[in-house]
Amino acid sequence: MSTPNMSKGLVILPGHTVALATRKVEGVGMNRLGPRVRKGLGWHRAQGGGAAGWLSRPDVAGLTDWVISERSDATMTEINRITGTNADMWGWAQGPYVGADASADARSFVARYAGGYGANIINGYLESIEVEGFYDDPVSDPTRRDIAQWAASRAHDDGITWDTYPITPDGLTHNYGHLEFCGVAYKRCPGSVLWAFINGELIDRVQPILKARQIGTKPAQPVAPLYRRASVPAFMKLDPLPATAMLNGVTFRLVNREYRVDQLTGCYTSIGSATRSRSSLREGDVVRIVYLHENGKWGIAAGGSRIPMDHLTVIEQTEEAA
């Protein structure tokens, strides 16, 4: 067996946006307790959508490090940085710690790393990710693919070899569900669907990713794209949504319908721009277009991405009912 190549950065992160929660304030959703160290990953289910914007608000008592959509767009956003400059925000993600209800893995984690931080170590030493959707909602394959790539990249950089994943060099698991620290009586996060994936399919997906890079069974990976978040036009934040609206001197018409993607389609920060706002839509994906450009060739998706409409087909209401 070849000796694994454990050079950091060898397993790349999936494509993602960066929108750091710079407005958070001490004592509301986070504490600044000093540099963080990643000893594992904390998994959560958001109980809805729009988690990146919600958690980034200065009045919200919570903060995870990453958010990803559960749907086919698999939009991943980094909202808090665990390493590097100013990486000292210990987001309120994994609490509260209830030792009597905690799992054996959770108790081992706290016992091993607590030191002078006590139970705060759970937030400080776990990099957390929020998967949007409710506990019983399915998680799309593009989302499963991206979080497996994310988990593989983190596991590799944390010194885990492909044949020992998900066990760390310290002998502990690399993956923790929120419920493991607080107990199911308080919260069953991340819910049965995501929790089953983490303890089964995620391992089956991550191990071959690690093996391919660590022992060189595949060519070097391409550089992952870094996306820039598209701005949501002001008129899309109104309630109710206006039937028509102007943007950059052009009229947009409200449609607010789901479309099926017929061919690989890019998503952009603005009309005519080459800057991508997220990963491409794939054949068979479904995307909600809120407004159509007056020429019908461009649409604005719910998250603000500008999408060419050439290969999108509206899903008729009769089709939805079926």
Image (cartoon, helix red, strand yellow):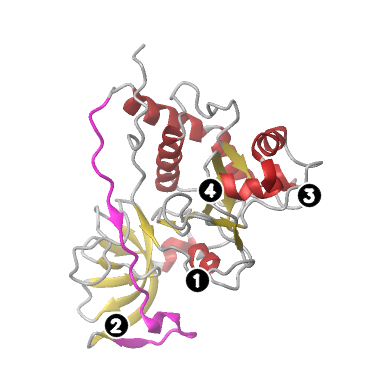
Dot 3: element: loop
Spot occupied by residue 32 in the image (x, y as percentages of width and height): 58, 59
Q: Nearer the viewer, mark 3 or mark 4?
A: 4
Q: Residues within 10 Å of mark 1 (few under 14, many from 20)?
A: few
Q: Residues within 10 Å of mark 2 (few under 14, many from 20)?
A: many
Spot occupied by residue 238 in the image (x, y as percentages of width and height): 46, 84
**Residue at left offset 71%, top offset 46%:** 118
Q: Which residue is mark 2?
A: 252
Q: Is residue 240 a member of the stretch shown in magenta?
A: yes
**Residue at left offset 35%, top offset 36%:** 11
Q: Which residue is mark 1?
A: 23
- Identify the mark nearer the N-term, 2 or 4: 4
Dot 2: element: strand
Residues marked 1 and 2 touching at CB (< 8 Å): no
- Identify the mark nearer the N-term, 1 or 2: 1
Which region of the structure is painted magenta? Answer: 218-246
Dot 1: element: loop
Q: Amino acid at mark 1?
A: Arg
- Identify the mark nearer the N-term, 3 or 1: 1
Q: Nearer the viewer, mark 1 or mark 2?
A: 1
| Residue 250 found in image quarter | bottom left
Q: Is residue 280 visible?
A: no
Q: CA distance from mark 3 to mark 2?
A: 48 Å
| Residue 180 found in image quarter | top right
Residues marked 3 and 2 touching at CB (< 8 Å): no
Q: Amino acid at mark 4?
A: Arg
Q: Nearer the viewer, mark 3 or mark 1?
A: 1
Q: Amino acid at mark 3?
A: Ala
Q: Nearer the viewer, mark 1 or mark 4?
A: 4
